[in-house]
Amino acid sequence: MNESNTRNMDNSKLIVLNVVPRILGFLDRNPDSKTYGCFERYYWHYKLLDFPNSRFQEGALLLALLFKNKFDGNLFFNKESIYRWCIAAIKYWAKSRNKKGSTNELYPHENSFCATAMSAYAISEALLILEENSLIDIEKTGVWLAKNSNLEVSNQEAGASIALLNIYLITGKKYFLEASENKLQRIIKYQDESGFYPEYDGYDIGYQSLTLGLLSKYYKKRESNQLFNSIKKGIQFIERYIDDNGYYDNSSASRNTQFLYPYCFSIFGSPVLNKISEGLRKNKIINPVWLDDRYVIPLTIDYLQTYLVLFDKKC
Amino acid sequence: MLMTTPKLICLRIFNLTVGRYHFFAMILRKFLLKMLISGKKEKYVACSKYFDWNDLNRF
Protein backbone atom coordinates (compact mmCIF):
# COMPACT_ATOMS: atom_id res chain seq x y z
CA MET A 1 0.00 0.00 0.00
CA ASN A 2 1.48 3.36 -0.97
CA GLU A 3 2.00 6.50 1.09
CA SER A 4 -0.84 8.47 -0.46
CA ASN A 5 -3.39 5.73 0.25
CA THR A 6 -2.29 5.74 3.89
CA ARG A 7 -2.86 9.50 3.99
CA ASN A 8 -6.26 9.10 2.32
CA MET A 9 -7.29 6.58 4.92
CA ASP A 10 -6.23 8.63 7.93
CA ASN A 11 -7.96 11.82 6.77
CA SER A 12 -11.34 10.15 6.21
CA LYS A 13 -11.10 8.14 9.41
CA LEU A 14 -10.18 11.13 11.61
CA ILE A 15 -12.98 13.26 10.22
CA VAL A 16 -15.55 10.51 10.75
CA LEU A 17 -14.43 9.70 14.29
CA ASN A 18 -14.47 13.41 15.20
CA VAL A 19 -18.00 13.90 13.95
CA VAL A 20 -19.64 10.74 15.32
CA PRO A 21 -20.08 12.03 18.91
CA ARG A 22 -21.85 15.11 17.53
CA ILE A 23 -24.19 12.92 15.45
CA LEU A 24 -24.86 10.70 18.48
CA GLY A 25 -26.00 13.87 20.23
CA PHE A 26 -28.75 14.21 17.62
CA LEU A 27 -30.18 10.89 18.77
CA ASP A 28 -32.77 10.35 21.52
CA ARG A 29 -30.95 7.59 23.41
CA ASN A 30 -33.45 7.24 26.27
CA PRO A 31 -35.21 3.87 25.93
CA ASP A 32 -38.16 5.13 28.02
CA SER A 33 -38.80 8.06 25.69
CA LYS A 34 -41.63 8.06 23.12
CA THR A 35 -39.12 9.36 20.60
CA TYR A 36 -36.40 6.79 21.44
CA GLY A 37 -34.39 6.31 18.26
CA CYS A 38 -35.29 9.67 16.70
CA PHE A 39 -32.27 11.50 15.27
CA GLU A 40 -34.01 14.86 14.78
CA ARG A 41 -32.93 16.78 17.85
CA TYR A 42 -34.92 19.88 16.87
CA TYR A 43 -38.03 17.72 17.14
CA TRP A 44 -37.55 15.51 20.21
CA HIS A 45 -35.31 17.73 22.37
CA TYR A 46 -35.77 21.40 21.43
CA LYS A 47 -39.44 20.78 20.54
CA LEU A 48 -39.23 23.52 17.93
CA LEU A 49 -40.63 21.44 15.07
CA ASP A 50 -43.95 19.69 14.64
CA PHE A 51 -42.60 16.61 12.87
CA PRO A 52 -39.19 14.91 12.36
CA ASN A 53 -37.31 14.95 9.04
CA SER A 54 -36.94 11.29 8.05
CA ARG A 55 -33.53 11.88 6.47
CA PHE A 56 -32.00 12.16 9.94
CA GLN A 57 -32.77 8.46 10.43
CA GLU A 58 -29.98 7.72 7.95
CA GLY A 59 -27.86 7.87 11.10
CA ALA A 60 -28.90 4.23 11.61
CA LEU A 61 -26.52 3.22 8.81
CA LEU A 62 -23.65 5.11 10.42
CA LEU A 63 -24.25 3.21 13.65
CA ALA A 64 -24.46 -0.14 11.85
CA LEU A 65 -21.13 0.51 10.07
CA LEU A 66 -19.42 1.53 13.32
CA PHE A 67 -20.84 -1.44 15.22
CA LYS A 68 -19.71 -4.01 12.65
CA ASN A 69 -16.27 -2.75 11.56
CA LYS A 70 -13.20 -3.00 13.72
CA PHE A 71 -10.50 -0.47 12.93
CA ASP A 72 -7.99 1.63 14.82
CA GLY A 73 -9.71 4.36 16.85
CA ASN A 74 -13.23 2.96 16.48
CA LEU A 75 -14.43 2.94 20.09
CA PHE A 76 -17.94 2.09 18.89
CA PHE A 77 -17.09 -1.35 17.49
CA ASN A 78 -19.21 -4.16 18.92
CA LYS A 79 -20.74 -1.93 21.60
CA GLU A 80 -24.15 -3.11 22.79
CA SER A 81 -25.39 0.50 23.09
CA ILE A 82 -24.56 1.26 19.46
CA TYR A 83 -26.45 -1.86 18.38
CA ARG A 84 -29.52 -0.98 20.46
CA TRP A 85 -29.55 2.64 19.25
CA CYS A 86 -29.28 1.46 15.68
CA ILE A 87 -32.26 -0.85 16.12
CA ALA A 88 -34.20 1.94 17.82
CA ALA A 89 -33.43 4.33 14.92
CA ILE A 90 -34.60 1.76 12.37
CA LYS A 91 -37.82 1.14 14.28
CA TYR A 92 -38.42 4.87 14.67
CA TRP A 93 -38.04 5.36 10.91
CA ALA A 94 -40.54 2.58 10.27
CA LYS A 95 -43.00 4.02 12.81
CA SER A 96 -42.88 7.55 11.44
CA ARG A 97 -43.57 6.67 7.79
CA ASN A 98 -46.78 7.62 6.03
CA LYS A 99 -49.39 4.87 5.55
CA LYS A 100 -48.18 3.86 2.10
CA GLY A 101 -44.54 3.69 3.14
CA SER A 102 -43.26 7.08 1.99
CA THR A 103 -41.55 9.53 4.35
CA ASN A 104 -41.45 13.28 4.94
CA GLU A 105 -38.63 15.79 4.91
CA LEU A 106 -40.08 19.30 4.71
CA TYR A 107 -43.72 19.12 5.86
CA PRO A 108 -46.31 16.56 7.05
CA HIS A 109 -47.80 14.27 4.34
CA GLU A 110 -45.13 15.42 1.92
CA ASN A 111 -44.49 11.93 0.50
CA SER A 112 -40.99 13.06 -0.42
CA PHE A 113 -39.40 10.92 -3.10
CA CYS A 114 -35.94 12.14 -2.12
CA ALA A 115 -36.32 11.47 1.60
CA THR A 116 -38.00 8.10 1.01
CA ALA A 117 -35.30 6.94 -1.41
CA MET A 118 -32.30 8.08 0.62
CA SER A 119 -33.60 7.01 4.02
CA ALA A 120 -34.82 3.67 2.64
CA TYR A 121 -31.34 2.99 1.26
CA ALA A 122 -29.71 3.78 4.62
CA ILE A 123 -32.23 1.79 6.66
CA SER A 124 -32.16 -1.23 4.32
CA GLU A 125 -28.35 -1.19 4.26
CA ALA A 126 -28.31 -1.09 8.08
CA LEU A 127 -30.71 -4.07 8.18
CA LEU A 128 -28.42 -6.04 5.84
CA ILE A 129 -25.29 -5.20 7.85
CA LEU A 130 -26.90 -6.25 11.12
CA GLU A 131 -28.61 -9.25 9.45
CA GLU A 132 -31.96 -8.16 10.88
CA ASN A 133 -34.06 -8.76 7.78
CA SER A 134 -37.33 -9.29 9.65
CA LEU A 135 -37.09 -6.34 12.03
CA ILE A 136 -39.53 -4.07 10.17
CA ASP A 137 -41.90 -4.22 7.22
CA ILE A 138 -39.81 -2.51 4.60
CA GLU A 139 -41.82 -3.89 1.68
CA LYS A 140 -44.42 -1.16 1.63
CA THR A 141 -41.71 1.47 1.21
CA GLY A 142 -40.29 -0.62 -1.62
CA VAL A 143 -43.69 -0.76 -3.32
CA TRP A 144 -44.05 3.03 -2.99
CA LEU A 145 -40.57 3.63 -4.44
CA ALA A 146 -41.25 1.26 -7.33
CA LYS A 147 -44.42 3.17 -8.22
CA ASN A 148 -42.91 6.66 -7.96
CA SER A 149 -40.00 8.44 -9.55
CA ASN A 150 -38.33 11.80 -10.04
CA LEU A 151 -36.53 11.50 -13.37
CA GLU A 152 -35.36 15.13 -13.35
CA VAL A 153 -33.10 14.42 -10.40
CA SER A 154 -30.70 11.55 -11.05
CA ASN A 155 -29.30 11.30 -7.53
CA GLN A 156 -32.76 10.58 -6.13
CA GLU A 157 -33.44 7.91 -8.75
CA ALA A 158 -30.07 6.33 -7.93
CA GLY A 159 -30.99 6.31 -4.23
CA ALA A 160 -34.29 4.63 -5.05
CA SER A 161 -32.57 2.08 -7.27
CA ILE A 162 -30.09 0.91 -4.60
CA ALA A 163 -32.83 1.01 -1.93
CA LEU A 164 -34.98 -1.31 -4.09
CA LEU A 165 -32.02 -3.63 -4.68
CA ASN A 166 -31.49 -3.84 -0.92
CA ILE A 167 -35.18 -4.49 -0.34
CA TYR A 168 -34.94 -7.35 -2.84
CA LEU A 169 -31.95 -8.73 -0.93
CA ILE A 170 -33.94 -8.49 2.30
CA THR A 171 -37.24 -9.92 1.06
CA GLY A 172 -36.15 -12.14 -1.82
CA LYS A 173 -39.04 -10.77 -3.92
CA LYS A 174 -38.16 -10.37 -7.61
CA TYR A 175 -40.61 -7.47 -7.98
CA PHE A 176 -38.15 -5.22 -6.15
CA LEU A 177 -35.20 -6.41 -8.23
CA GLU A 178 -37.09 -5.64 -11.45
CA ALA A 179 -38.10 -2.21 -10.15
CA SER A 180 -34.50 -1.54 -9.15
CA GLU A 181 -33.18 -2.53 -12.58
CA ASN A 182 -35.82 -0.43 -14.35
CA LYS A 183 -34.72 2.65 -12.47
CA LEU A 184 -31.07 1.86 -13.14
CA GLN A 185 -31.71 1.49 -16.86
CA ARG A 186 -33.47 4.85 -16.97
CA ILE A 187 -30.56 6.54 -15.15
CA ILE A 188 -28.09 5.10 -17.65
CA LYS A 189 -30.36 5.97 -20.58
CA TYR A 190 -30.60 9.63 -19.56
CA GLN A 191 -26.89 10.02 -18.86
CA ASP A 192 -25.56 12.77 -21.09
CA GLU A 193 -23.01 11.95 -23.82
CA SER A 194 -20.42 13.97 -21.92
CA GLY A 195 -20.98 11.79 -18.84
CA PHE A 196 -23.15 13.79 -16.46
CA TYR A 197 -26.39 12.55 -14.97
CA PRO A 198 -29.03 15.31 -15.26
CA GLU A 199 -29.97 17.36 -12.22
CA TYR A 200 -32.84 19.61 -13.28
CA ASP A 201 -31.65 19.72 -16.88
CA GLY A 202 -28.04 20.45 -16.16
CA TYR A 203 -24.96 19.06 -14.52
CA ASP A 204 -23.91 19.43 -10.92
CA ILE A 205 -20.56 18.13 -9.69
CA GLY A 206 -21.60 17.51 -6.09
CA TYR A 207 -24.77 15.64 -6.95
CA GLN A 208 -22.88 13.81 -9.71
CA SER A 209 -20.49 12.46 -7.06
CA LEU A 210 -23.46 11.44 -4.90
CA THR A 211 -25.13 9.66 -7.85
CA LEU A 212 -21.87 7.93 -8.74
CA GLY A 213 -21.44 6.84 -5.12
CA LEU A 214 -24.89 5.26 -5.05
CA LEU A 215 -24.32 3.60 -8.43
CA SER A 216 -20.94 2.31 -7.22
CA LYS A 217 -22.67 0.73 -4.24
CA TYR A 218 -25.10 -0.89 -6.66
CA TYR A 219 -22.17 -2.07 -8.78
CA LYS A 220 -20.53 -3.70 -5.77
CA LYS A 221 -23.65 -5.80 -5.22
CA ARG A 222 -24.54 -6.47 -8.86
CA GLU A 223 -21.75 -5.99 -11.37
CA SER A 224 -22.45 -5.33 -15.02
CA ASN A 225 -20.37 -3.98 -17.89
CA GLN A 226 -23.04 -1.48 -18.77
CA LEU A 227 -23.06 -0.02 -15.26
CA PHE A 228 -19.27 -0.10 -15.06
CA ASN A 229 -18.96 1.89 -18.29
CA SER A 230 -21.59 4.40 -17.22
CA ILE A 231 -19.87 5.04 -13.89
CA LYS A 232 -16.45 5.34 -15.54
CA LYS A 233 -17.84 7.90 -17.96
CA GLY A 234 -19.44 9.79 -15.09
CA ILE A 235 -16.19 9.87 -13.12
CA GLN A 236 -14.25 11.06 -16.17
CA PHE A 237 -16.75 13.92 -16.46
CA ILE A 238 -16.03 15.03 -12.88
CA GLU A 239 -12.26 14.63 -13.18
CA ARG A 240 -12.14 17.52 -15.67
CA TYR A 241 -13.42 19.96 -13.04
CA ILE A 242 -11.45 19.06 -9.89
CA ASP A 243 -8.27 20.97 -9.03
CA ASP A 244 -5.31 19.58 -7.11
CA ASN A 245 -6.96 20.37 -3.77
CA GLY A 246 -10.22 18.62 -4.56
CA TYR A 247 -11.93 21.98 -5.18
CA TYR A 248 -14.14 22.94 -8.12
CA ASP A 249 -15.88 26.04 -9.40
CA ASN A 250 -19.60 25.46 -8.86
CA SER A 251 -20.84 28.73 -10.36
CA SER A 252 -22.08 27.22 -13.64
CA ALA A 253 -23.52 24.04 -12.19
CA SER A 254 -27.27 23.52 -12.12
CA ARG A 255 -27.47 23.22 -8.35
CA ASN A 256 -24.35 25.01 -7.07
CA THR A 257 -23.34 22.35 -4.59
CA GLN A 258 -19.84 22.45 -3.07
CA PHE A 259 -19.37 18.95 -1.69
CA LEU A 260 -17.78 15.81 -3.13
CA TYR A 261 -18.86 12.34 -2.06
CA PRO A 262 -15.58 10.38 -2.27
CA TYR A 263 -16.84 6.76 -2.33
CA CYS A 264 -17.00 6.26 -6.10
CA PHE A 265 -13.40 7.50 -6.52
CA SER A 266 -12.16 4.88 -4.06
CA ILE A 267 -13.98 2.02 -5.81
CA PHE A 268 -12.82 3.02 -9.29
CA GLY A 269 -9.31 4.19 -8.42
CA SER A 270 -9.73 7.77 -9.60
CA PRO A 271 -6.97 10.34 -8.91
CA VAL A 272 -9.71 12.62 -7.51
CA LEU A 273 -9.38 10.70 -4.24
CA ASN A 274 -5.79 11.92 -3.74
CA LYS A 275 -6.91 15.44 -4.58
CA ILE A 276 -9.67 15.28 -1.98
CA SER A 277 -7.17 13.99 0.53
CA GLU A 278 -4.84 16.91 -0.22
CA GLY A 279 -7.72 19.36 0.18
CA LEU A 280 -8.67 17.79 3.51
CA ARG A 281 -5.08 17.92 4.73
CA LYS A 282 -4.98 21.66 3.97
CA ASN A 283 -8.55 22.18 5.29
CA LYS A 284 -9.47 23.70 1.95
CA ILE A 285 -12.60 21.80 0.99
CA ILE A 286 -16.02 21.16 2.43
CA ASN A 287 -16.20 17.98 4.50
CA PRO A 288 -18.48 16.58 7.25
CA VAL A 289 -16.94 18.82 9.91
CA TRP A 290 -18.06 21.92 7.99
CA LEU A 291 -21.59 20.77 7.27
CA ASP A 292 -24.79 21.72 9.10
CA ASP A 293 -26.87 19.21 11.08
CA ARG A 294 -29.19 18.54 8.18
CA TYR A 295 -26.54 17.19 5.79
CA VAL A 296 -23.68 15.99 7.97
CA ILE A 297 -24.98 12.42 8.33
CA PRO A 298 -25.00 11.24 4.67
CA LEU A 299 -21.59 12.73 3.90
CA THR A 300 -20.12 11.18 7.07
CA ILE A 301 -21.50 7.80 6.04
CA ASP A 302 -19.88 8.17 2.60
CA TYR A 303 -16.54 9.11 4.20
CA LEU A 304 -16.72 6.07 6.47
CA GLN A 305 -17.65 3.76 3.60
CA THR A 306 -14.73 5.21 1.62
CA TYR A 307 -12.37 4.57 4.52
CA LEU A 308 -13.60 0.99 4.85
CA VAL A 309 -12.98 0.37 1.13
CA LEU A 310 -9.41 1.66 1.43
CA PHE A 311 -8.92 -0.26 4.70
CA ASP A 312 -10.08 -3.49 2.98
CA LYS A 313 -7.65 -2.85 0.11
CA LYS A 314 -4.87 -2.43 2.66
CA CYS A 315 -5.83 -5.72 4.29
CA MET B 1 -38.62 34.57 -0.43
CA LEU B 2 -38.60 33.88 3.30
CA MET B 3 -41.00 31.88 5.40
CA THR B 4 -43.36 33.97 7.51
CA THR B 5 -45.75 32.97 10.27
CA PRO B 6 -48.92 33.46 8.16
CA LYS B 7 -47.39 31.40 5.33
CA LEU B 8 -46.41 28.63 7.73
CA ILE B 9 -49.92 28.55 9.24
CA CYS B 10 -51.46 28.33 5.74
CA LEU B 11 -49.02 25.58 4.75
CA ARG B 12 -49.84 23.55 7.82
CA ILE B 13 -53.59 23.95 7.38
CA PHE B 14 -53.14 22.73 3.80
CA ASN B 15 -50.86 19.82 4.88
CA LEU B 16 -53.29 18.61 7.52
CA THR B 17 -56.45 18.91 5.42
CA VAL B 18 -56.54 18.49 1.63
CA GLY B 19 -52.76 18.02 1.53
CA ARG B 20 -53.22 14.48 2.87
CA TYR B 21 -54.60 13.47 -0.53
CA HIS B 22 -52.24 12.63 -3.38
CA PHE B 23 -53.83 14.97 -5.94
CA PHE B 24 -53.52 18.06 -3.75
CA ALA B 25 -50.09 17.00 -2.45
CA MET B 26 -48.89 16.93 -6.08
CA ILE B 27 -50.36 20.39 -6.70
CA LEU B 28 -48.41 21.73 -3.73
CA ARG B 29 -45.24 20.02 -4.94
CA LYS B 30 -45.58 21.50 -8.44
CA PHE B 31 -46.29 24.91 -6.93
CA LEU B 32 -43.18 24.76 -4.75
CA LEU B 33 -41.05 23.54 -7.65
CA LYS B 34 -42.22 26.44 -9.77
CA MET B 35 -41.67 28.99 -6.98
CA LEU B 36 -38.23 27.76 -6.01
CA ILE B 37 -36.58 25.82 -8.81
CA SER B 38 -38.04 25.66 -12.34
CA GLY B 39 -36.84 28.43 -14.60
CA LYS B 40 -35.21 30.26 -11.72
CA LYS B 41 -31.82 31.76 -12.32
CA GLU B 42 -30.92 31.15 -8.70
CA LYS B 43 -32.47 27.81 -7.81
CA TYR B 44 -33.21 26.89 -4.22
CA VAL B 45 -30.73 24.19 -3.23
CA ALA B 46 -30.81 23.21 0.43
CA CYS B 47 -27.34 21.69 0.42
CA SER B 48 -25.47 24.80 -0.72
CA LYS B 49 -24.11 28.17 0.42
CA TYR B 50 -21.67 26.66 2.88
CA PHE B 51 -18.42 28.45 3.66
CA ASP B 52 -15.87 28.65 0.86
CA TRP B 53 -12.38 30.12 1.39
CA ASN B 54 -12.98 32.39 -1.60
CA ASP B 55 -15.64 34.18 0.47
CA LEU B 56 -12.81 35.79 2.46
CA ASN B 57 -11.58 37.60 -0.65
CA ARG B 58 -14.88 39.29 -1.40
CA PHE B 59 -14.06 42.60 0.27
Image (cartoon, rainbow, N blue to C red):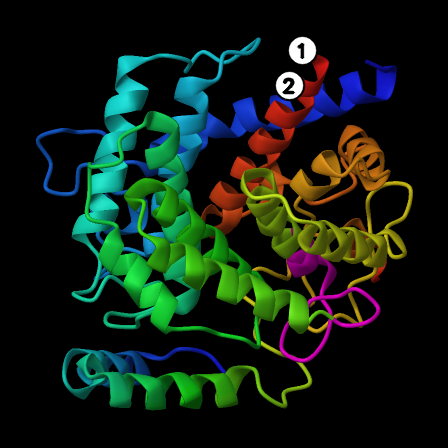
Q: Position of residue A97 (x, y in %)?
A: 22, 58
Chain under numbered label 2: A
Chain on which label 1 sits: A
Q: Quadrant of the N terminus of chain A?
A: top right
Q: Which mark is residue A239?
A: none
Q: Are marks 1 and 2 in contact (CB under 8 Å)?
A: yes
Secondary structure predominantly adopted by residues drawn in magenta: loop
**Label 1 – label 2 distance at C-alpha:** 5 Å
Q: How many marks?
A: 2
What residue lies at 71% left-to-right and 65% top-to-bottom? A204
Q: Is residue A50 above or below residue A62?
A: below
Q: Quadrant of residue A174?
A: bottom left
Please give the label number shown on residue A315.
1
Q: Secondary structure at mark 1?
A: loop
From the top left corner, tell me how far across and down residue B31 is, in percent.
42, 90
**Pointer 2: what residue?**
A312
Residue B32 position, x and y percent, is 44, 84
